[in-house]
Image (cartoon, rainbow, N blue to C red):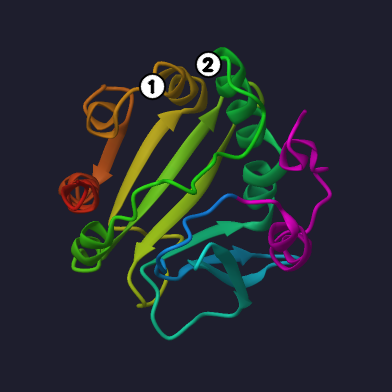
Amino acid sequence: MIDPYFSLPRTTRPSEWFEKILPSLALRLPVDAQTPWAAVHVLGAGGGTWAVRVTAGQLQVQRGLPAEVLSQWSMTSGHFREALAGALRDRTAGVLTKLGLPLALPDLSRAPLNQLGWQALATVQGSLAFQLADRKVADSYRYVLTLGSGQAAFDKADAQIDVDLDDLAALAAARTPPLRLLASGKLRVQGNSELPMRALTALLGGQR
């Protein structure tokens, strides 16, 4: 059985996703802790800001930016569509198929909650852009991660990672660990080259 996420139409609007579809999904989430808020800024027509977190196994979604967030993602409405129901969603489905896994959202109910990693990540300041090149349509998709509750970046980020989408899918299908992914040579870093490693090391350092 295919998860409803993998059959969302490309016409799905951000407001529909965050305010109707996402809260209605049968998500399997950790039941014994609360995660920090993560915000998503969708820029352009039909856009807005939404924030999500997990509390006692339930996903909380609110419109607008909370006073304190651990991370903020910024993208255009067109690139949001590619992530939700377009090129990136289809590449994810391809990776799951290669791994022999069902087209379903992951079961996170027993995932370790990395409180120490979140605390460490909260001390890392900066913004990191991911520029994903799609050879199939001669286009690229931009997603910018801003750490903390400050002004979210988009056009200018402290560091940028450029990667080919097919290369990224191949690395994911090979189950490449995060640190090896950064060292694979497939990811090209511009700007503050230390920021991606600092952020990843902070997050992974709290895992047990």
Which residues make up the magenta segment?
1-27
For this view, does 62 lie left or right of residue 31? right
Question: Is label 1 in contact with label 2 (beta carbons under 8 Å)?
Answer: yes
**Image location (x, y in percent) of residue 50:** 60, 71
Q: Position of residue 119 (x, y in %)?
A: 22, 66
Q: Is residue 150 magenta?
A: no
Q: Residues within 10 Å of mark 2 (few under 14, many from 20)?
A: few
Q: Secondary structure at mark 2?
A: loop
The image shows residue 171, relative to residue 141, as above or below, that is above
* Residue visible at 18% across and 62% down in the picture: 120
| Residue 25 visible here | yes
Query: In the image, is residue 175 above or below residue 37?
Result: above
**Amino acid at pointer 2:** Leu
User: What is the secondary structure assignment of the residue under circle 1?
Assistant: loop
**Amino acid type for the residue under numbered disc 1:** Arg
Alpha carbon distance from label 1 to label 2: 9 Å
Residue at 40 percent of width and 20 percent of height: 171
154 left or right of 184 in image: right
Q: Which residue is mark 2?
A: 99
Q: Is residue 135 visible?
A: no
Q: Earlier in the sequence, mark 1 or mark 2?
A: 2
Q: What residue does disc 1 label?
A: 175
